[in-house]
Image (spheres, rainbow, N blue to C red):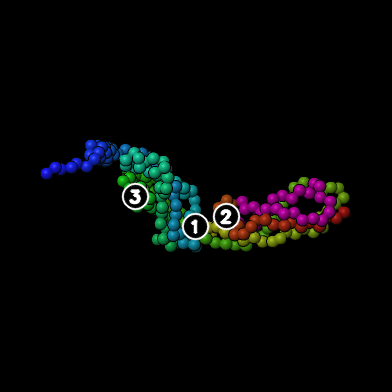
Amino acid sequence: MRIRLPKNLGWKFGSLLASVLLWLAISVTPDVVTHHTAPILYRNLSKDLMVIGDSPDELHVELRGPSRDLTSGALGDTVAMLDLASVKTAGERTFTISDTNLSLPPGVTFLRAVPSQLRLRFARMATKDVPVEIRFTGALPSGYKIKTRGVAPERLRIAGAEERIAAVNSVQTDTVDLNHARGSGTYLVDAFIADPQVHFESSPKVIVTLDIERN
């Protein structure tokens, strides 16, 4: 009885051998260590609280794994995620960075982070309505005076940490130039808050109305 061998058996065996050798080469590739900068994201922070102070927005992590998994492309989606659901009151809280905070590709191991801990300050959110002050630059031409002035809206709502809000008593407009004013008119300008950690709850644009007449 004659046994018939499949055609191209040599080619098939060679392809199988090459695949096995390639898999072995990949599987025994030694791990390498690299450093990666990961942005810090927060989740589950209460709507009544905010993070204040000079908290870092990124951290440096040391990672180990196959070189193919440590490229900038492979680590492009890696972020440090901090769950703030346990924060219920204002004050300071310390968070220790571990592998549970990182979204790492399979096969990549977290070694350490710099900084290894984050101490964050939390403050209670507050809002307040404050008056809008009109600022001028220059002077009216000789023989003219401002009869009445007004701004709409007269008050704007600001928001921020309670301690910051308490220190803000008013906001000011960008300057209205009086050098070439001759009659009544309106000016659309922006209001400005001096404290960068306080923000407007709505649009900061206001309308300044001037009624100018001859002396």
What's the magenta region? 167-194
Label 1 element class: strand
Q: Nearer the viewer, mark 1 or mark 3?
A: 3
Instruction: Tell whether label 3 touches label 1 (CB within 8 Å).
Output: no
Q: Nearer the viewer, residue 99 or 26?
A: 26
**Which is nearer the N-term, disc 2 or disc 1?**
1
Amino acid at the residue labelled 1: Met
Amino acid at the residue labelled 3: Asp
Give the Cα separation between the discs numbered 2 and 3.
34 Å
Q: Dot 2 corresponds to which residue? A: 198
Report the residue that reaches farthest toward the front.
Answer: 1
Of the 4 image quadrants, the one containing the N terminus is top left
Q: Dot 1 corresponds to which residue? A: 50
Q: Dot 3 corresponds to which residue? A: 99
**Which is nearer the N-term, disc 2 or disc 3?**
3
**Which is nearer the N-term, disc 1 or disc 3?**
1
